[in-house]
Image (spheres, rainbow, N blue to C red):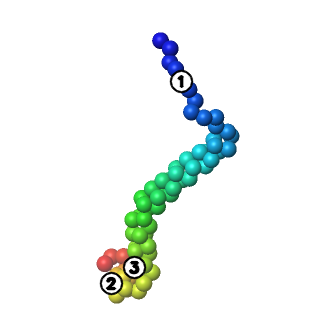
Amino acid sequence: MEVEFEFQKERKIGDFVQNFIDLFKLIYKHFVTTIFGLSALPLAGIALVYYFLSTKSPFLQAVAHSKILMDSLGPDY
């Protein structure tokens, strides 16, 4: 069984380099979009938690005040 195969054209080193660069760009673009797509929701959640912890909300002030009040009453209470 003999397979007949003919090259379509001669390829120079510049063609290989250009194909490698194009493939690298394609892989890099896929990697960056995947990583940022997967990390967008956790980063948004962290930013939201940081925002609420860094602002002086009445609820957090009441919790902190009650903790100070409970500490001042002593360990038995």
* SS under mark 3: helix
In the drawing, what numbered circle is on residue 53?
A: none
Residue at horizontal 58 percent and vertical 30 percent from the top: 7
Cα distance between the residues tagged 1 and 2: 77 Å
Pick whichever of labels 3 and 1 is earlier in the sequence: 1
Of residues 18 and 31, which is closer to you in this image? 18
Judging by the rendered image, the residue that carries numbered circle 1 is 5
Label pair 1/2, CB-CB below 8 angstroms: no
Of residues 23 and 75, which is closer to you in this image? 23
Of residues 58 and 44, which is closer to you in this image? 44
Q: In the image, is residue 75 above or below residue 31?
A: below
Q: Depth-wise, is mark 3 or mark 2 nearer the camera?
A: 3
| Residue 23 percent coordinates (x, y) | 55, 47
Q: Which amino acid does label 1 sit on?
A: Phe
Task: Count neighbours of disc 3 (C-alpha within 10 A) and say few if under 14, some if 14 to 19, many if 20 or more.
Answer: few
Pick whichever of labels 3 and 2 is earlier in the sequence: 3
Label pair 3/1, CB-CB below 8 angstroms: no
Of residues 42 and 37, which is closer to you in this image? 37
Q: Which amino acid does label 3 sit on?
A: Phe
Residue at horizontal 41 percent and vertical 70 percent from the top: 44
Residue at horizontal 42 percent and vertical 58 percent from the top: 38
Quarter-wise, where is residue 66 in the image?
bottom left
All told, the count of numbered labels is: 3
Label pair 3/2, CB-CB below 8 angstroms: no
Cα distance between the residues tagged 3 and 1: 68 Å
Task: Count neighbours of disc 2 (C-alpha within 10 A) and say few if under 14, some if 14 to 19, many if 20 or more.
Answer: few
Q: In the image, is residue 28 above or below residue 45?
A: above
Residue at horizontal 36 percent and vertical 82 percent from the top: 60
Cα distance between the residues tagged 3 and 2: 11 Å
Judging by the rendered image, the residue that carries numbered circle 2 is 59
Q: Depth-wise, is mark 1 or mark 2 nearer the camera?
A: 1
Judging by the rendered image, the residue that carries numbered circle 3 is 52
